[in-house]
Image: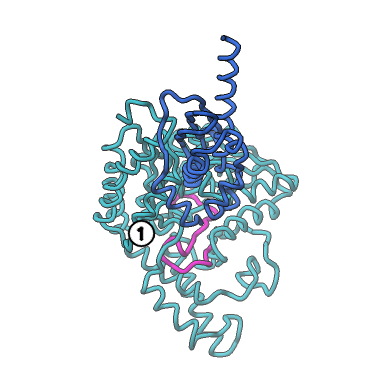
Chain colours: A cyan, B blue
Amino acid sequence: MSTTRRINLDHSAGKQVDPRVTEAMLPYMNAYCGNPSSLHTLGQEAKRALEDARAKVAALVDAEKKESIIFTSGATESNNLAIKGIAYRYKDRGTRLITSNVEHMSVVNPIKYLSTKGFETLFLPVDKYGFVILEKLEKELTDKTTLVSIVYANGEIGTVEPIQEISKIVHSKGAYLHVDGTAACGQIPIDVKKEGIDLLTVSSNDMYGPKGVGALYVKEGIRLEPQLHGGGQERGIRSGTENLPGIVGFGKAAEIAKNEISKESARLTKLRDRFIDGLLKPIPYSFLNGHPTRRLPDNVSVRYSFIEGESMLLSLDLEGVFASSGSACTAKTLEPSHVLLAIGLKHEEAHGSLMFTLGKENTEEDVDFAVSLMPNIVKRLRAMSPLTPKELNE
Amino acid sequence: MYTQKVMEHFKNPRNMGEISDADGVGTVGNPVCGDLMTIYIKVKDGRLEDIKFKTFGCGSAIATSSMITELAKGKTLEEGLKITRGNVADELGGLPPVKMHCSNLAADALHAAIEDYRKRQKAKEVNK
């Protein structure tokens, strides 16, 4: 607005597509315009590109074979397909579905929808860091439970769930484990075989691929009730002509992520911790949301008492710094984030949350600049707030 | 999302602060909903001689608080009571629909402050 500076610290909302990805996609919007279902050369070239991308996404999550990857239109569709697909396919075995209180809306809402269709659904509580309470999961699992859906790492507060432990519990009762890997995949290594994941949601844009494409890993032997019926693409599970440029780009993004994950993850973790320190140390009544170490390398979620998140993010925006808030006021609903309430924050604490998500192009200078702005922003808003204790304004 | 006018009031809020010896104080909202505002008024000869605000809330909560102090300053109490939520939003060039209810409480806070002033006056009369 009043500045030409643009520092994106809101990467979970949207990421730049990696230039290597854009380059890989272009031919599939031009010369290689074929349909993978066609038998002629043009179609077969497209088919090869499709399968090549499938292999790359499979490799990123250590899937047993590339056929375990189903391409979708993104994480929301993958989550819907996993949840409704399992619930309906195995409803004769049982109708109990379990998830947690800190899931993305594309998990929460399909589960809520199914609760109106004769399914018995349960949202597990979490502790103050956002970890699913495992004893509660053990207690609530019955042999009528067909699916448990848990996020790999929380996109809002960064907490990485103990998926391997959760998987052991879930499998002890014969249920399937769906994991929403949207925020985590490409950022931290995921091994579906080792971690015992039956279904995994993967998003392209979250790893610098194009928007509008995602995948669902489905372990061999697991069947899904299709949610889109049509020409029978994607083994009949997800009909519709493949979004080939998008899928090729997604494949390239997955390949790059696999090669660069360890270096980038270490870099971001260092940057994240520098950022958190800078945001909290100089300002009283400031707190970290989520766990200090078992968190995503890109996630910085903090809260400041007595003030509200949207007014903080507007103040940052005026300086060309882009962030996000856990407050109602930035969303379409009036309630603050259900994730922040689930970790036990009071409404007014949740309203005072501010979230940053780091990305590839962010540097120490970006983070230090944002840090340098916060004391004055907080001071100004606290001076305006009737909740601020008098001594803080002196 | 916000008009330039809203942002201008957000950046440079008018009449922000407290009046320690206010003649009337009105608080509306709730930190649970994310918006809480307090309006302080000083009344002289039936007019709003001075008015200040304190607000916890989003950009539009701050901008509407600032705007109401501008609209109300110098007006008679009756005129103050006639200022509506709609007037405040219009003067700011409009507010996003989602903000119209939750964050447009400034008129209510002003009305509450005027009611508080009248209540205090009545109490004074009775005690005379």
Residue in view at x 70 percent, y 53 percent: A88
Which chain contains the residue that carries disc 1? Answer: A
Residue B85 appears in the picture as rendered = yes
A219 part of magenta stretch: no
Residue in view at x 35 percent, y 59 percent: A2
**A305 up-or-down from A155: above or below:** above
Which segment is the magenta one?
A194-215
B90 on left or right of B66: right
Along the line of sight, which residue is nearer the eye, A372 or A357?
A: A372
Quarter occupied by residue A122: top right
Residue A61: % across, % down: 44, 59
A138 on left or right of A226: left
Question: Which quadrant is home to the C terminus of chain B?
Answer: top right
Q: Which residue is mark 1?
A: A2
> Secondary structure beneath disc 1?
loop
Quarter occupied by residue B113: top right
A213 part of magenta stretch: yes
A119 on left or right of B89: right
A44 on left or right of A238: left
Residue A160 appears in the picture as rendered = no
